[in-house]
Image: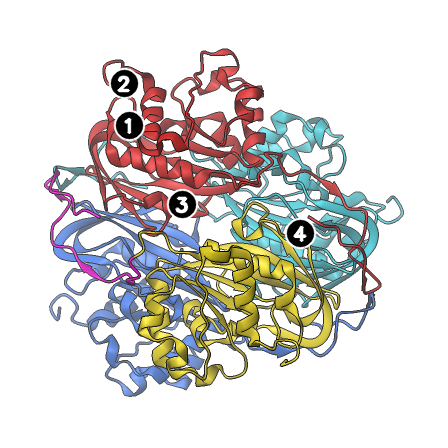
Chain colours: A yellow, B cyan, C red, D blue
Amino acid sequence: MAERYPGGMHGAIASGITELLGESVAVTVATQDQPEHGLTEEVLDATDVLTWWGHATHASVDDAVVERVHLRVLGGMGLLVLHSAHFSKIFRRLMGTTCSLAWRNSGDTELVWSVNPSHPITAGIPQPVVINEHEMYGEFFDIPAPDELIFISAFSSGEVFRSGCCWQRGKGKVFYFSPGDQEYPVYHHPDIRRVLANAVLWARPEHRADFIAPAVINQPAPQFNRGDITEGVGA
Amino acid sequence: MAERYPGGMHGAIASGITELLGESVAVTVATQDQPEHGLTEEVLDATDVLTWWGHATHASVDDAVVERVHLRVLGGMGLLVLHSAHFSKIFRRLMGTTCSLAWRNSGDTELVWSVNPSHPITAGIPQPVVINEHEMYGEFFDIPAPDELIFISAFSSGEVFRSGCCWQRGKGKVFYFSPGDQEYPVYHHPDIRRVLANAVLWARPEHRADFIAPAVINQPAPQFNRGDITEGVGA
Amino acid sequence: MAERYPGGMHGAIASGITELLGESVAVTVATQDQPEHGLTEEVLDATDVLTWWGHATHASVDDAVVERVHLRVLGGMGLLVLHSAHFSKIFRRLMGTTCSLAWRNSGDTELVWSVNPSHPITAGIPQPVVINEHEMYGEFFDIPAPDELIFISAFSSGEVFRSGCCWQRGKGKVFYFSPGDQEYPVYHHPDIRRVLANAVLWARPEHRADFIAPAVINQPAPQFNRGDITEGVGA
Amino acid sequence: MAERYPGGMHGAIASGITELLGESVAVTVATQDQPEHGLTEEVLDATDVLTWWGHATHASVDDAVVERVHLRVLGGMGLLVLHSAHFSKIFRRLMGTTCSLAWRNSGDTELVWSVNPSHPITAGIPQPVVINEHEMYGEFFDIPAPDELIFISAFSSGEVFRSGCCWQRGKGKVFYFSPGDQEYPVYHHPDIRRVLANAVLWARPEHRADFIAPAVINQPAPQFNRGDITEGVGA
């Protein structure tokens, strides 16, 4: 992996987004070995879209940080969940399911097909994207039915996988994208980089986002009083 | 085709359903060359679930019969749309899209994967179903996003297809299932026959179905009168 | 109506969009009494988003024009379907259902509640929008389950209605919005005008739209040949 | 509450189900003050559908029990989440959102409208159900978009609420139904009892359910080997 990704997985992901979105975005990185995994309140307060790649050490991620990221997503921050992060605490918490799947690492070819050709995430993406060698992820993928299904992958070994899925949770947008194993140069692939850049743009919060998760409201005034309208409760 | 399906496509479909559901169902057949394509008012009045297979001659199907079937589905009759019937008038009318797809007939192997293992249509179905040779149907399949996605097919040639899809329209249930080309013995395949039988059971109308399509109601009485409840409008 | 809407319904709708979106849009109008209802090939070729309001005379709309608009929507043009246009030919064709509903015109108050506070269509919209008097539209509304449900209305008379619904059909986006009866000054209401303007922006096609409806593809080359990748088929 | 529900909330819920489903079901009750809240491994092993009502003391529910119920639902057990249990740990874990809402307890009239007249949960239910007095629950309700929206409530005070919602999570079915406050005799209302009984039948697992949550599979054999099929992996 050090040869393939000398700047780390995070470095390759960041460089692709920077390359394609340029100065319209400010990209920073956070890694698990940093204090609070680099995801302090200050950092999250400055983050519109978070990408999350993780592998093998999900269990050692601090629950307090997961809680913080969770609330930020529900408040409007976009989240891109990448490859083996299907088993991350944050993804499982947002989905409510096991997020388990079938897998095999035998260097099969993966073809990524769009089933939503007018979706912003598929802009400029060939049909299909060809990944010469990759880890196989297959069905059954235990996720809630996506709000929007974007990509389905075929493997030369015969399996299929819902490889690009969108959900809304609270005020935030979540995109799961499966290509991205550390043993293959997937994040140097121009089409994969394009998908990530498109997804960052798609997942941006509305400019009016306050990043406050929805909360219970004890609504004092009825809207109608014996059929007459009272003052509007307002936005 | 005559050798492979001596009883016609309809004969093979009917025999599979009869074989698996036995006396719990009464199976009859209707063919395009019959008067009103065999789908008279009387026949439809006695039909809970209709299977529709068609190929090449969709354009010559009588619009009045399509209208009749359409209203019956909206009123609660189940509909199974099979293989090349993706281009039938009735399916296109129910979907509102072109229902176009990519295809190639080169005898590729098709694997049918379930993405919904607890759905009644997948009961008793292996993961995956293996069809040794079949026509390829691939994405992009121009359909409304299914209410429930059940099967995704992989082809040995690399394509994928949403091969089993459920929708509700009006009071009726619609299932599209792509395996079933006339040049291959697909309808003799025990797993495919099982899917059809399961889908017939799934698509049955609720016992309370009146088979009357939803209609506009000029609702005379308000529910509230200055905040006081009036008589309930009832079911 | 002439007093309330001296410029016609189309005039009021157009003026609201112009007022809020200014020079970022070019608004033109087409009316049913024009040749081809004003929706010639040339006009549609220049249209990114079409708003459709109609009442009572749906049946006299030319089927050829409906077909033309239908294909344009499937090719990427956005469509806003307003109020009584739930019974328009174009909406029924896109939905595949009867689009029937319950109604009563007795000047009830309508409150329009958002159930999707981070959706672009709800930007700047108070919770709820208060319409002092309006025609009642109630459930059951016979539509396919919306891809996104945006607004639910309550009436002072006690009924509810899914008053703001989004669907994707082909490459195009469709938004149905029920406020807008000709007997009430609904289209002069600033919040309603804001919803229409937001929806126009939301329904815009992706800049890459070619406005060509999806079509069948006889895909010549397999993606894999005995496990080896062949030439990519490309976008 | 003791006067209104002398047998407790659980007693009223149980009696309604027993009354309507009779000997086809075996109903038992578990309460929070029991060891393990009455939801031991043995009890859950014998449970096809669990109803969950809770109020105010959600925080004191044992996380280990929640985890056990969660896995059982993902394995196929049906779950009915009732009224203030929108804030229960189990519902929030399954949904992944805050599940917050607007509320006010001022004895408003609630009308429960069906938006899915052919769904099994609405069988025999009048349109609308009239609840003379109830606590108001209003939007925005912070839940994932339901897989199926069944009921929308209107309140005489003007609010609306998505009061009946279905989701699938893993192999299990989840139904949220909001009527059921302890200060009102809602669970003695015949229509509400009918909804609960219908929902129990709807949420039953498929007879093939093994109640084992989906798990990761390291799939050893490819399906294809250079284009030739290998041995089927089977179900």
* Residue at image mark 1: C187
Residue B138 in the magenta stretch? The answer is no
When asked about the image quadrant of residue B151, the answer is bottom right
**Is label 2 in a helix, a strand or a loop?**
loop
Q: Nearer the viewer, mark 2 or mark 4?
A: 4
Judged by its main secondary structure, the magenta piece is loop
Badge 2: chain ID: C
What's the distance in space between the residues labelled 3 and 1, CA to CA?
Answer: 32 Å
Badge 3: chain ID: D
Instruction: Out of A47 and C189, give the one closest to the viewer.
Output: A47
* Residue at image mark 4: A126
Q: Are marks 2 and 4 on the same chain?
A: no
Local crowd at mark 3 within 10 Å, few (<14), some, or many (≥20)?
many
Magenta region: which residues? A210-235
Expressed as whole percent of the image width and height from the top left, the position of residue B81 reads: 65, 44
Local crowd at mark 4 within 10 Å, few (<14), some, or many (≥20)?
some
Expressed as whole percent of the image width and height from the top left, the position of residue B194 reads: 68, 59
Disc number at residue D117? 3
Expressed as whole percent of the image width and height from the top left, the position of residue D89 reads: 32, 74
